[in-house]
């Protein structure tokens, strides 16, 4: 089994990154028409025309998004415009670059890690706040339990309309977790680098980027912004076509100094059901040399063993951890099971390699 920590070995002890004036100028140039691009595209499958590259879901110049993703793109754009009305990008950039550096994402040499998720609601599971103390205190208590249980990072939903999230949830979680050395990740339907800056200003060390929502050039813009702010990115795919886009985007960035995880979400976005078989069927399609993350449907210790057996290095787990009264114990049990399976898989591979010599 490949070494899952290798791509992140340079991240330990990283310092705050302040871009040079020339880098900021170059970034400003390629951002000039960004707002028009997303106003044209959000809520529509039409290609906006500013991007010369083929769209992420190439077919006659159109993007293919489910009803949920299209609605979330529309909502995300509305929030983006409201945020820009409150704070200029220049001011936000200053806050983002002046923020204390987040803890680095460190993956275990034992071969398996978990990104634990904090969300108060989901379209599929409904209200998830019953096991929390309520309000900000409940969020702080939950993310602290995640850190104590061994989470490598904590994903925090900031989407308000369908997931009950807020940027303040992210900021509070980051404040609680920073002294413990655990980074937070903004999970939202991001459509613009401005939202990456918001995440960094709130204390996050990483962001989720949904491949299907974006054209290749826009994925690159979000990756560029995250790299400039020294944040990790979880690129989320749903199917083989998404993974092909991931391969193409990363192939063009092989010399970039950036931290990228690649996740496969096995949820059907139309039915909101999970299809664990997709994690098995597409496991070998994920890029080599990048930590592989199993998303959605990992709800038990047995599920963890299963996805590690498929070749995943990490799992993003939300609903199950939000629904238990003892997330610290469940997280610890899942990590122990995953690492035991990873060790067994490695040992088997070593034996097979020896027998072939």
Image (cartoon, rainbow, N blue to C red):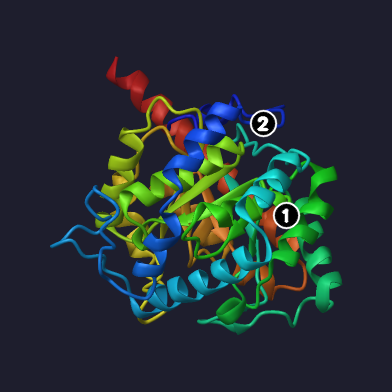
Q: Secondary structure at mark 2?
A: loop
Identify which residue is drawn at 48% across, 34% down.
26
Identify which residue is drawn at 47% across, 55% down.
209
Which residue matches tag 2?
A: 18
**The C terminus, quarter of image:** top left
What mark, if any, has residue 202 been given in the picture? 1
Q: In this orientation, which residue lies closer to the viewer: 323 or 216?
A: 216
Identify which residue is drawn at 43% across, 55% down.
34
Q: In this orientation, which residue lies closer to the viewer: 355 or 71?
A: 71
* Coordinates of residue 343 in the picture (x, y in percent): 54, 36
**The N terminus, quarter of image:** top left
**Res 292 visible:** no
Residue 143, quarter of picture: bottom right
Question: Marks 1 and 2: in contact by CB < 8 Å?
Answer: no
What mark, if any, has residue 261 been given in the picture? none
For disc 2, the neighbor class at 10 Å (few under 14, some 14 to 19, many from 20) is some
């Amino acid at each position: 089994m490949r070494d899952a920590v290798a791509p992140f070995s340079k991240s330990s002890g990283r310092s705050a990154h302040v871009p040079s004036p020339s880098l900021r100028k170059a970034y400003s140039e390629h951002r000039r028409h960004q707002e028009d691009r997303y106003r044209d595209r959000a809520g529509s499958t039409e290609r906006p025309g500013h991007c010369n590259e083929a769209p992420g879901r190439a077919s006659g110049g159109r993007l293919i998004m489910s009803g949920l993703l299209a609605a979330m793109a529309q909502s995300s754009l509305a929030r983006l415009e409201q945020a820009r009305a409150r704070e200029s990008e220049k001011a936000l950039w200053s806050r983002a670059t002046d923020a204390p550096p987040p803890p680095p994402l460190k993956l275990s040499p034992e071969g398996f890690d978990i990104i634990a998720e904090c969300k108060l609601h989901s379209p599929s599971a409904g209200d998830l706040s019953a096991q929390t103390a309520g309000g900000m205190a409940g969020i702080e208590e939950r993310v602290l339990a995640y850190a104590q249980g061994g989470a490598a990072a904590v994903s925090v939903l900031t989407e308000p309309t369908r997931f009950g999230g807020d940027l303040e949830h992210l900021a509070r979680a980051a404040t609680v977790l920073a002294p413990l050395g655990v980074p937070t990740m903004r999970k939202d339907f991001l459509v613009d680098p401005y939202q990456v800056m918001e995440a960094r200003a709130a204390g996050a060390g990483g962001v989720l980027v949904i491949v299907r929502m974006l054209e290749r050039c826009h994925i690159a813009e979000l990756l560029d912004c995250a790299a400039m702010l020294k944040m990790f990115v979880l690129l989320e795919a749903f199917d083989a076509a998404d993974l092909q886009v991931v391969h193409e985007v990363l192939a063009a960035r092989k010399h970039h100094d950036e931290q990228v995880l690649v996740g496969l979400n096995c949820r059907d976005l139309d039915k909101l059901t999970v299809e664990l078989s997709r994690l098995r069927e597409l496991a070998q399609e994920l890029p080599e040399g990048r930590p592989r993350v199993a998303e959605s449907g990992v709800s038990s210790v047995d599920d963890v063993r299963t996805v590690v057996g498929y070749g995943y290095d990490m799992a993003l787990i939300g609903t199950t951890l939000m629904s238990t009264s003892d997330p610290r114990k469940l997280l610890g049990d899942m990590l122990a099971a995953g690492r035991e399976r990873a060790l067994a898989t490695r040992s088997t591979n070593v034996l097979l390699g020896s027998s072939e010599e």
